[in-house]
Amino acid sequence: MSNTQLQRWLERACENTRTALQATPAEELAPYFAGELAFGTAGLRGIMTHGPAAINSYTVARATQGLAQFILEEGGQDAGVVIGYDSRTNSQAFAQITATTLAANGIKAYLYDALRPTPMVSYAVRQLGAAAGVTITASHNPKEYNGYKVYGADGSQLAPEAANTVAALFAAVDIFDGVKSCDFDTAVARGEIIILGADMDESYIAQVMAQQVDPTAITSATSTEDFRLVYTPLHGSGTSVVPQVLRRAGLKNLFTVPSQVQPDGQFPTVNSPNPETMDAFLHGIAVAEGNACDLVIATDPDADRVGCVARGKDGQFVLISGNQMGALLLDYIISAHNRRGDMPPRPFAVKTIVTTQLAQTICQRHGVKLYDVLTGFKFIGEVILQNEVPDGGSYLFGFEESYGYLKGTYVRDKDAVVACLLIAEMAAHYKSRNMTLIDALDALLDTYGHYHERTINISFPGADGVQRMSDLMDSLRNAPPASFAGRAVCRLRDYSTAEITVLSSGEKQPTNLPKSNVLYFELEGECAVIVRPSGTEPKVKVYLMAKAENKAAAEVVLDALEREMGLYTV
């Protein structure tokens, strides 16, 4: 711990902060005074507590000062910055600090009047022609976390080059002497902070509703009163928009979860507000069982990710993975266009390199071009932008394995609101055929092949965690294994060098993607092992992919690959 840093905070911070620091044992303070919170491509994310390596009013103001200087250098002060926030503890306060810091720097701030889904910030940036956007959220992290996510003028997360510039400006700001501020109410009265409300909501919702594939699907199903589903915002911002979107689509039998419908940054009913886990659905399943529903939809606190459980053949609810839901939606959208004969010209879809290869098979079968991009929805946004030229392609759908989906180009980030609408519509479509989404998934895999995936996280806690993560990547890169679990490595994609190596011949091919610290081992039999360090946490993410004759056989392959990866972490 830096005693100099701590002493400075004890001398310069506000009285409440100084009192809290004096009352906290040194060993608890140590992690948050051992360095500084880094500004990465996703902005800031960390534990909410005191110190330069945590999320608090001082680090949020410092980040905003760095962003303000970037905007001023780019001449975007009149275009302004859109600011939103979710239900997390301190999110509203941090949003107001962001607004006052921008206003004090002569930059117009557009602040939502209450919590909103993160994609609504992306939308407002594009709608208003703003220079940037900020949303205060830590996505689906536990309650102790918060974050500061930045969008560029296109509504996508900051590109790496811009993020690096902001990071350098952020690092140069003195946390006490380098930050400008002003009174919030005064800035609002002067028009330096503009409050966004219902008008922007209506504009956004209209764009979401326009993404319906078959506007009659839900109304046809609900005319018989037998299509019923449960929605839970997991105490987050989805409660402000998702229910009204589903009801506008004609859903009559929508049930929310009373214990989870109100915003609450303590997330009292779940261990973590993560719709990727079965734990998040326990309260929703109880409501579903009491109301004869076959589907439960959950969004994370900032409503950019969505997860689902659906009733299986045995009557039990089954969690649908992000890969599976993305493939279901992709097939549903393509098939609907084909049924109507209205497929747009040069259709294309986009997925990330760590997302299921089932998407490639679906697209190939239907003559749809599929782009593979690096992990991060900003890269999906880049492909959309590149095709917005004469004779460019028609964007159908984009998704990533981590439960993020987007149809439409009105935003440039994943949008759980439109995903909820599409999932409900798709479920209604299959309901009219006496199928649940689990039945539809089984049929999809029988049609295109049994592709199954698994993600494992290898944690590296402690002061030497970053070095051990680097050592693991170096060992796999410098001495790549010839096989995994008895399956030969056919090709190695090293995205750090942007090269693909054909192991049988040594031939080199370009990845045609930007450089990134990712290793992709293509195995025989359409299997794969992909390894990359997390950009926000001290862990390495390993993505395992298998194709087999059925789910049970694929699980055997995934089990073997997981066991083998364990050997590289000892």
Image (spheres, helix red, strand yellow):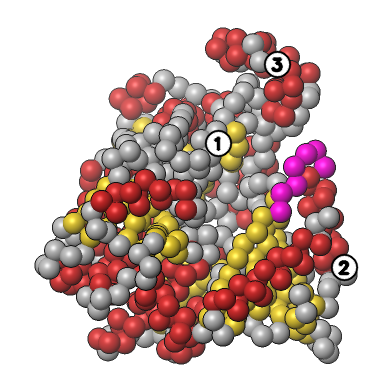
Q: Earlier in the sequence, mark 2 or mark 1?
A: 1
At numbered mark 3, what does the secondary structure look like: helix, strand or loop?
loop
Q: Earlier in the sequence, mark 3 or mark 1?
A: 3
Q: Is residue 430 magenta?
A: no
Q: Which residue is mark 3?
A: 25
* Start-end of magenta stretch: 458-464
Please identify the quarter of the rendering in which residue 330 is found.
bottom left
The quadrant of the image that shows the N terminus is top right
Specify few, some or many for label 1: CA neighbours under 10 Å numbering under 14, 14-19, or 20 or more.
many
Within-10-Å neighbours for mark 2: few <14, some 14–19, many 20+: few
Looking at this rendering, what residue extends furthest in the left direction?
Answer: 223
Give the image location of residue 469, x and y in percent: 78, 52
The amino acid sitting under disc 1 is: Tyr
Figure check: 36 above or below 441: above
- Residue at 77 percent across and 60 percent down: it is 566
Q: Residue furthest right?
A: 479
Q: Nearer the viewer, residue 382 or 92?
A: 92
The image shows residue 128 at horizontal and vertical percentages of: 34, 50
Q: Amino acid at mark 2?
A: Asn
Amino acid type of the residue tagged 3 in the rendering: Pro
By secondary structure, the bulk of the magenta-drawn segment is best described as loop
Q: What's the residue at 35%, 52% (across, down)? A: 285
Instruction: Kindly report the distance in space between the C-alpha atoms of the residues bearing marks 3 and 2.
Output: 44 Å
